[in-house]
Image: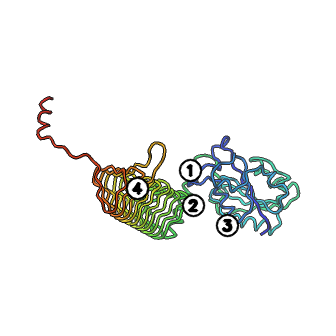
Amino acid sequence: MESVCAVILVADPKNSAVHGLQEVLFWPMAAWVANACHTAQIGAVCAYGAEEPQEDWAKALIWQDPKEFLAGRTGAVLLLRGEMPLLTGELLQKLVQLHQERGNTVTEMFSQGGAIYCAKSEYLHENWQMGEGLFASLTNEAQRAGGRIQLVETTDGDALFCPKDPWELLQLRNRAKDLQIQRLCRQGVQVLSSDGVLIAPDAQVGAGTVLYPGTILKERVKIGANCVIGPNSLIENSTVGDDTVVNASQIYSSQVGNRVKIGPFTQLRPDCVVHDGVKIGDFVELKNSVIGEKTSVAHLTYIGDSDFGKNINVGCGVVTVNYDGIHKHRTTVEDDVFIGCNTNLVAPVTMHKGSYSAAGTTVTHEVPEYALVIGRSRQELKPGWAVGKRKKK
């Protein structure tokens, strides 16, 4: 294939109700188009029509006036709309191949939903017109100039569908959702109901995994085999191992191992590593922490900026006190530790291997191996005190 580049026209958000920076399954529509170009092994890709966004995907494109971009370039140029998220690399390759084999000046591939073009770069540079007028006049201008024009209809209406208003955009989103669920089902994933299920185009899910209603898998997610995800769970930029359950919970930018049980109502904030066989129960929040194998954090607990070892039992209501108002500090809990209910671990602090904390303890100093730490007021009993209290009412 000869040298090929692409120009993506992104509708200006200030002037259009539908534009390429709006998301379909967590990707801006223009990012879908750019990914199709990447799949088709298109070299340089220029985007034009909207201010350059700050997202990482946009930095892989050249945001420039197309006339400047095309100056001095030779070969074929794909002219695409940024609002065609279902466009495929396979279709782009087919268009380019047809264009080059026939020696066309302009080749238009169309369906009822829209059209894409391939043109000689020198012709496009000489006749560049901005905005909608370019699409409307491209083939006519080439024909008037005596160029070779070819119109090709495709039956893949989804690929070229370009929404014109919010209602059509909603229809497109629903179609994209169905296609992503279809992709996973054909790979052996069980989707019990599509209600509320949203799958990013780069999400990977292993065979035998079950997705319940309300499951949302955002970008950069990889889930292993034979897991159960949902109902009502959200995972973003994270990996989950095999045979793991994530029930009504949220996971962000973290790594979860095999045979882990999470939820319900658990949140893993960024930079957590949860090793194999761990249990993270209801109303638990983890942040920037490591949880070792077979440790149990059953309920009503906050663990932040901490390193927990293996086989630890964390009682109800445990809190790592990691912030002193100015700086964050880390807590270290070694293997085989037992942390009693309502224990506060005031960082920086370490509980060494096999140690215990009594319920209600506030730990402020290092706890040696196999020691018991008790840091609470001794109970005081006043017999009959309540009788006198009640008589005063």
Do the numbered discs 3 and 1 sit on residues whose CB atoms are within 8 Å? no
Disc ID at residue 90: 3
> In the rendered view, how is the structure colored?
rainbow
Q: Residue at x 86, y 53 (%)?
A: 126
Foreground tag (3 vs 1):
3
Q: Amino acid at mark 4?
A: Ala
Q: Amino acid at mark 1?
A: Leu
Q: Amino acid at mark 3?
A: Glu
Q: Is residue 195 visible?
A: no
Q: CA distance from mark 4 to mark 2?
A: 22 Å
SS class, disc 1: helix
The numbered mark, 4 or 2, whose residue comes first in the sequence reads 2
Q: CA distance from mark 4 to mark 1?
A: 26 Å
Q: CA distance from mark 1 to mark 2?
A: 17 Å
The numbered mark, 3 or 2, whose residue comes first in the sequence reads 3
Residue, disc 2: 201
Q: Residue at x 59, y 46 (%)?
A: 166
Q: Is residue 55 visible?
A: yes
Residue, disc 1: 170
Residue, disc 4: 248
Do the numbered discs 4 and 1 sit on residues whose CB atoms are within 8 Å? no
Q: CA distance from mark 3 to mark 1?
A: 25 Å
Foreground tag (3 vs 2):
2
| Left or right: 172 as drawn, with respect to 386 | right
The numbered mark, 1 or 2, whose residue comes first in the sequence reads 1
Q: Position of residue 311 (x, y in %)?
A: 35, 65
SS class, disc 2: loop
Q: Position of residue 98 (x, y in %)?
A: 76, 67
Q: Quadrant of the N terminus?
A: bottom right
